[in-house]
Image (spheres, helix red, strand yellow):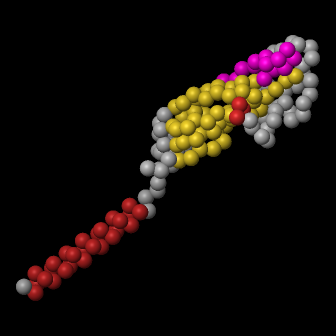
Amino acid sequence: MKKFAKNFHQQRLLFFCLSLVLLLTAACEKPKEGKVVVSEQEFAIRQDAPNSWVIDAKGKVKNVGGADVKNVEVTGYCRSCGEVFTMGSWYVSEYDKTPEQKDVIRYLPAGAQEDFSFTGVAFMPDQSGKGPDQLPDNLECEIVSFETVDK
């Protein structure tokens, strides 16, 4: 009978130790993270007034991470444009983006892709009324921020 009690306590101790190891292993598991990338981007020049042109953007963002994300904010930049309002030259307002200069995708499941579009990547005033022939260099769309959804 003593041998049975001794084995029983050893089994309980072994079960407790194994349970503790499994619990600690599960607690150390890294949570899944979201990762969002711009998968497609396209820019177009649009005349918004008789002597003014603007660059608009559209494209797609994709969640390539392992978790769903929300509030994905995407905007555009013209790295080669100046910051000073000059006739006949592209300029930008890099500091304070207006709601029209960005798009927010409210929810994006893991592996999903969603369209975005916004206006006002860059601006060009020109008294001649003749539009620009080509887009400026170094145009790009970027993910500004997003939140990983906890499950």
Which residue is painted at 75% across and 37% down in the image?
97
Q: How far from the left and from the top, in percent, is residue 48? A: 79, 19
Where 145 falls versus 134 (above or below)? below
Q: Residue at x 59, y 44 (%)?
A: 146
Q: Is residue 85 left or right of residue 95?
A: right
Give the residue furthest to the bottom: 2
Magenta stretch secondary structure, dominant: strand
* Residue 40 placement: quadrant: top right
Q: Is residue 47 magenta?
A: yes
In this orientation, which residue lies closer to the viewer: 50 or 90? 50
Residue 12: horizontal and vertical position, in percent?
Answer: 21, 75
The residue lying furthest to the left in this view is 1
Residue depicted at 66% across the width and 24% down the height: 42
Q: Nearer the viewer, residue 33 or 114?
A: 114
Residue 140 among those drawn in magenta: no
Res 13 quadrant in image: bottom left
At which x and y percent is residue 142?
67, 37
In the image, is residue 24 above or below residue 32? below
Residue range corresponding to the magenta coloring: 41-54
**Residue 108 visible in the displayed image:** yes
Q: Is residue 22 left or right of residue 28?
A: left
Please tell me which residue is depicted at 79% across the width and 41% down the height of the picture.
95
Q: Is residue 133 left or right of residue 15?
A: right
Q: Is residue 63 visible?
A: no
